[in-house]
Image (spheres, rainbow, N blue to C red):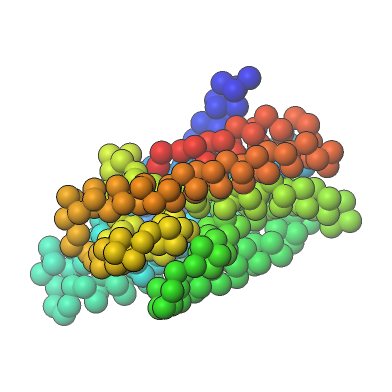
Amino acid sequence: MGNEVKTTIEEVRSEIRSELADYLAQQRSYLTSIASELLPVCEAMDEFLLDGGKRLRPLFAYAGLLASGATPNRAIIRAISSLELLQACALIHDDLMDKSDTRRGKPAIHRHFENLHQSTSMNGHATQFGEAAAVLLGDLALVWSDQMLNTSGISIESLMATHKIHDEMRIELMAGQYLDVREAGENSYSAVRSLRIARYKSGKYTIERPLHIGAVIGQPAESENKSLLSALSRYGLPLGEAFQLRDDLLGIFGDTAVTGKPAGDDLREGKRTVLIAMTLSALDEAEKTELLNYLGKPNISPEKIEELRALIIRSGAVQEVENLIEKLTQQSLAAIEDPSIHPSSREFLTYIALSAVKRSA
C-alpha cells in the first residue's frame, strides 16, 4: 500500500506544479503588460516556484482534506497550491535576513538580482538593488498567495472557513520570524526559546495550519469540524517540531549535493537552533568557547566546519535531538487513530509524517 501512497503524492505534486505554472503564466502576461522591465521578475519567480520544491505545505493540506473524508478536485488543488506562494515569500525574505547566498543550489533571490544589476552594468549599488528586489518579490509572492486562493473556485463556505485559518497562520509565521530575528540578539542560548521559534516559524505553518486548511475546505462548518481540527493539531504540532529539528540537523550535517546549501551553512549563519543550544549546555567551558568563537563567522573553512561537527557529535546533542524527533514523531502518529480522522486517510498521514522527519533535504 505504501507504493500507492507514494504514487498519489507524486501525482498531487505534479498537479500542484501545473496549477502554479498556469497561475504564473497569467501573472507574467499581466506584469509584462505593465512594463517589459518586469520580465526578470517573472522569470525569477518561475524558476523559484517551478524548479524543485517538496510541496510539503500543499501536501499536508491535501492530507487534511482526506482526513475530513472529502474528495479532491481541481479547484481544491488550486487552492492548496497557493501555499507554495506563501512559502516562497517566507524563503525569499528568510534568505535575505540570514544573508544566505544560495537556495536549492542556485543564487538566493537577493543574490540573483544583485548579479543582474552587475551583469547589465546598472548604476547604483548592486547589493542594495538585490536586497530591495528580494523584499518586493517576497511581498509579491504573499499577495499572489491570497489571489490564487481567492480565485481558486472552491465554495464560498470553504473559502470563508479557510480565510480564518489562513490569517492566523500568517500571523504566527511573522511572529515566529520576528522571534527568530530577535533571538540573534539574545545574550544566552536556550533550547526552550529555540523550540518555540521552531513551532511558530516553521512547524505550525508547514504542517498544522495546512492540515487545518485542507480540513475546513472539506468540512467548512465550524460546528462539525472542531474535533477533527483538534485531532489534526495533536498530529501536526509535534510533527512540525520534529520537522524543524530535522531541518536543524540538516543545516549542519546535510549533504550539500542533496540540500543545495553549503556544508555547515547554519554554523556560518550562527543559527540559534535547539541543536546548538543543547550542544552548548553539554560542553565544558573550553569547548563552549571554541564553538562560540566560530558561530556566525561567514568564512569558516571546510576543515574547521568538520572539527565543529565532530565537537557537536561528541557533546551528545545530535543523539539527544534524534531522540526528541523520535518521541515527537510517535506522539504525532498516535493521534492518527482519533475517530474524527477519516480512516481512509490514515495511511497517507502516516506516510507523509515519516517522509517529513526522515528526509535528507
The relative height of residue 203 versus residue 17 in the rendered view (above or below) is below
Q: Give the residue at x 57% y 53%.
A: 241
Q: Give the residue at x 64% y 67%.
A: 167
The relative height of residue 351 versus residue 189 in the rendered view (above or below) is above
Q: Position of residue 252 (x, y in %)?
A: 34, 50
The relative height of residue 22 versus residue 34 in the rendered view (above or below) is above
Q: Residue furthest left?
A: 121
Q: Nearer the viewer, residue 56 or 122?
A: 56
Q: Is residue 143 visible?
A: no
Q: Give the residue at x 18% y 72%.
A: 126
Q: Position of residue 168 (x, y in %)?
A: 66, 67
Q: Position of residue 73 (x, y in %)?
A: 67, 39
Q: Nearer the viewer, residue 163 or 273?
A: 273
Q: Is residue 94 visible?
A: yes
Q: Position of residue 43 (x, y in %)?
A: 31, 54
The relative height of residue 294 versus residue 320 in the rendered view (above or below) is below
Quadrant in the rendering for residue 354 = top right
Is residue 327 found left or right of 53 in the rendered image? right
Q: Nearer the viewer, residue 129 or 259?
A: 259
Q: Nearer the viewer, residue 292 or 118?
A: 292
Query: Which quadrant does the C terminus fall into?
Result: top left
